Structure formats: structure tokens, C-alpha cells
Image (cartoon, rainbow, N blue to C red):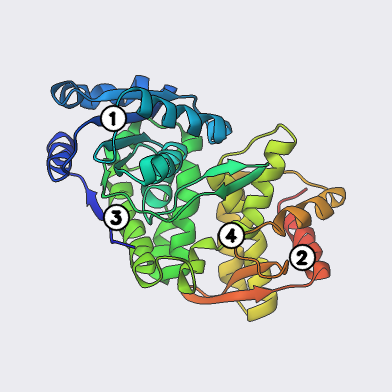
């Protein structure tokens, strides 16, 4: 898998124009959702008009990260004369970069695409690393391919348009990057004040967070080994997220990951000795900023069944990424059903449920 170019932008219009100019293409398309079409596309409309780019817009939120939306993108590309030499710009959050990347990777067996993430979650996670896909059959990212964007342009000024909840969603992935990298970055992340966010400081931390992911992806692009570190918090987090959709009480991805990390830090402490003081500090920060996802013991079996669909599993055995300490990653860890239920007990107790 080719390495993608990631640009932490200082002059967004100039960087986007140069990125487009480096690609040979016959037709240019831009994919947005209803929100980014209204609030983000105007910032690049002059460039798009000059290049005669054609717009494709789908519904907002992760509920639209599905086969119907994917088919709409394919259909509009085809109806407007896209060829294998065309170029797609994905302007939006993780839903758009995931779905748009998958659409580009499969249309005519693959066209080039550029990601312009507009949410914190997409900047530090979804748009970087080459994973694309859609939700299917009630499961997160069940269908997709590995195929990186040609270029990813990160314009952190878009973050000023986000509400607190969407900032926190992306920040959940940043906390994960801190836990799997080093104590300095982890400690810095736990000091950030969302009551009075300093956007210049956040931009600096975004750069560090993206570098953490890039370094891991470069070592293991197809998730055979160390890239599984990026799934910390996700085995349980994806189960929480799937349950939230099943029960029609949807939660943002980064919130689900944050709650998943509470569970998997406990599992790390019990199974491989993650330090109790760092467990308490991280859990306290998550509880203070993310609240909790209410569950009772009647949900344990359903959550367990959802976890069995995780893509890291082998032979139906649930596979965890755990931490012996900050930056000390233990992949391919398993646990009994009994210990997983004890993990849910800990989550409910420490979250006050």
C-alpha cells in the first residue's frame, strides 16, 4: 500500500490547489454531506468553480454510511461521466472520508481521491491510514478496503465550526493515541480544558496525534501486527456504538471509543498489569468529559455477541489490544466470557451506573 501525503495546512486554499495540481485527471468531483456542503464547501467554492468540479451530496451522520449512500455516489459519478482518470475530493467528517474513499476505491476498479477532513475525528483517525468502508448489517465498517488517499489536507480552522460534542468525539481517538504512544503526550491530552479550548494548542496536538497514527500505519499498513494498536478501545467501543444504533439512542464514535477504553484499561490492568494510577486518571477524565453509556447486566450477552463480530477476531475468539503501560502495547490478547462480564461490571461501577 502506497504511503499517503499528509499536509498540516498553513494556507488551505494554496495547499488544496497544489494538491489537485499534482494529480492528473479528466474530471473533478467533490463529495460532501448536507452539513459540510452548507458550512465547509463555500470555503473552497472558488477553486471548485475554476476547475469545473461537480458536487455530490449525501445525507449527514453515520446513519447514512450505508450501501444506499454508496450506490448514490457510484450512480452520480457514472451519470456525470467519471472515468478511471477522474479525481474525487472527500470534504467532510469520518463518514464522508470512509464512504468516499470506498466509493473511489471501487468505482471503475479505482479512481484517485483526496481527503479534506472537517472534523477532529476525521483529522486524527478516519482520513489517515487508508481504511475505507461502510456500515453493513448493523455492524460498524463491516465492508471496505485498504486504499489510502493520494493526499490528506488537514485544515484545523474547520474545528472552530464544531460543537463540544464533535470535538470530544475526535478527542477520544487522540486520547487513544496518547495511551499507545508515550506518557508525555498522554499527560498533555489529559490537561486540555474543553470549557476554554485553546485552538492553537489543539492544532499542535493534532499534528502529534496524526504522526502517531502515520508511524504505526507505515510499519503495518494492512493490520497484520502492530497496527492493531490503533484498535485499542474499539473492541468494546464498536459494540457500544452498534448497540446504540440498534436501540435508537445513537452515540458519536469517539464517545463509544472513550467508554471502550475504560473497559479495556480495566482489562489491561487485570490481565497485563497496566498501572492503577494511570487507569484512575484516564477513567476520571473520560467520566468528567464524556459521561457514560447506560447499560445493565441484561445487555451483557448482546454486547458480547456484538464483540464477536470484531474484525480482529480469529476463529470466533474475541481479540483485544491491551496495554501493559503507556506505549507498551500487547496485541492479540484474549479473555473469557466471565472476565468480559466482570469488565462490564467495572465499567458500570466506575461510571456510577
**CB contact under 8 Å: marks 2 and 4:** no
Q: Which residue is mark 2?
A: 340
First in residue order: circle 4 vs circle 1: 1
Q: Quadrant of residue 44?
A: top left
In percent of the image, x 55 and y 63: which residue is there?
232
Mark-to-mark CA distance, 2 and 4: 13 Å
Q: Residues within 10 Å of mark 2 (few under 14, many from 20)?
A: many
Mark-to-mark CA distance, 3 and 1: 28 Å
Quadrant in which the N terminus is drawn: bottom left
- Residue 319 visible? The answer is yes
Residue 190's x, y, as percent?
46, 57
Which numbered disc, 3 or 1, marks the residue closer to the eye?
1
Mark-to-mark CA distance, 3 and 4: 21 Å
Q: Secondary structure at mark 4?
A: loop
Q: Secondary structure at mark 3?
A: helix
Which numbered disc, 2 or 1, marks the residue closer to the eye?
1
In percent of the image, x 82 and y 49: which residue is there?
299
Q: Which residue is mark 3?
A: 207
**CB contact under 8 Å: marks 3 and 1:** no
Residue 254's x, y, as percent?
53, 47
First in residue order: circle 3 vs circle 4: 3
Q: Which residue is mark 1?
A: 29
Q: Which residue is mark 4?
A: 233
- Residue 104 visible? The answer is no
Mark-to-mark CA distance, 4 and 1: 35 Å
Q: Residues within 10 Å of mark 1 (few under 14, many from 20)?
A: many
Amino acid at each position: 500500500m502506497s504511503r499517503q501525503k499528509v499536509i498540516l495546512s498553513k494556507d488551505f486554499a494554496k495547499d488544496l490547489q497544489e494538491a489537485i495540481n499534482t494529480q492528473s485527471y479528466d474530471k473533478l468531483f467533490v463529495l460532501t454531506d448536507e452539513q459540510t456542503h452548507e458550512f465547509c464547501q463555500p470555503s473552497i467554492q472558488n477553486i471548485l468553480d475554476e476547475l469545473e468540479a461537480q458536487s455530490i451530496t449525501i445525507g449527514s451522520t453515520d446513519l447514512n454510511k450505508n450501501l444506499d449512500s454508496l450506490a448514490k455516489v457510484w450512480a452520480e459519478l457514472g451519470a456525470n461521466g467519471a472515468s478511471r482518470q477522474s479525481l474525487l475530493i472527500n470534504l467532510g467528517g469520518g463518514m464522508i472520508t470512509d464512504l468516499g474513499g470506498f466509493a473511489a476505491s471501487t468505482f471503475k476498479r479505482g479512481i484517485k481521491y483526496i481527503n479534506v477532513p472537517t472534523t477532529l475525528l476525521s483529522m486524527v483517525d478516519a482520513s489517515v491510514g487508508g481504511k475505507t468502508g461502510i456500515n453493513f448489517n448493523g455492524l460498524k465498517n463491516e465492508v471496505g478496503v485498504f486504499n489510502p488517499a493520494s493526499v490528506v489536507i488537514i485544515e484545523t480552522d474547520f474545528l472552530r465550526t464544531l460543537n463540544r460534542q464533535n470535538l470530544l468525539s475526535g478527542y477520544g481517538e487522540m486520547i487513544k493515541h496518547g495511551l499507545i504512544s508515550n506518557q508525555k503526550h498522554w499527560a498533555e491530552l489529559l490537561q486540555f480544558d474543553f470549557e476554554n479550548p485553546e485552538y492553537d494548542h489543539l492544532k499542535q496536538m493534532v499534528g502529534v496525534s496524526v504522526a502517531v497514527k502515520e508511524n504505526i500505519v507505515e510499519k503495518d499498513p494492512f493490520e497484520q501486527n502492530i497496527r492493531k494498536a490503533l484498535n485499542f478501545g474499539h473492541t468494546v467501543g464498536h459494540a457500544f456504538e452498534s448497540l446504540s444504533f440498534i436501540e435508537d439512542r445513537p452515540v458519536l464514535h469517539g464517545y463509544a471509543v472513550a467508554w471502550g477504553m475504560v473497559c479495556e484499561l480495566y482489562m489491561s490492568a487485570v490481565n497485563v498489569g497496566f498501572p492503577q494510577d494511570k487507569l484512575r486518571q484516564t477513567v476520571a477524565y473520560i467520566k468528567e468529559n464524556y459521561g457514560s453509556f447506560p447499560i445493565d447486566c441484561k445487555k451483557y450477552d448482546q454486547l458480547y455477541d456484538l464483540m464477536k463480530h470484531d474484525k480482529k477476531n480469529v476463529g470466533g475468539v474475541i481479540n483485544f489490544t491491551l496495554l501493559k503501560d503507556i506505549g507498551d502495547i500487547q496485541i492479540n490478547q484474549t479473555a473469557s466470557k466471565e472476565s468480559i462480564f466482570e469488565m462490564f461490571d467495572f465499567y458500570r461501577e466506575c461510571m456510577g451506573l
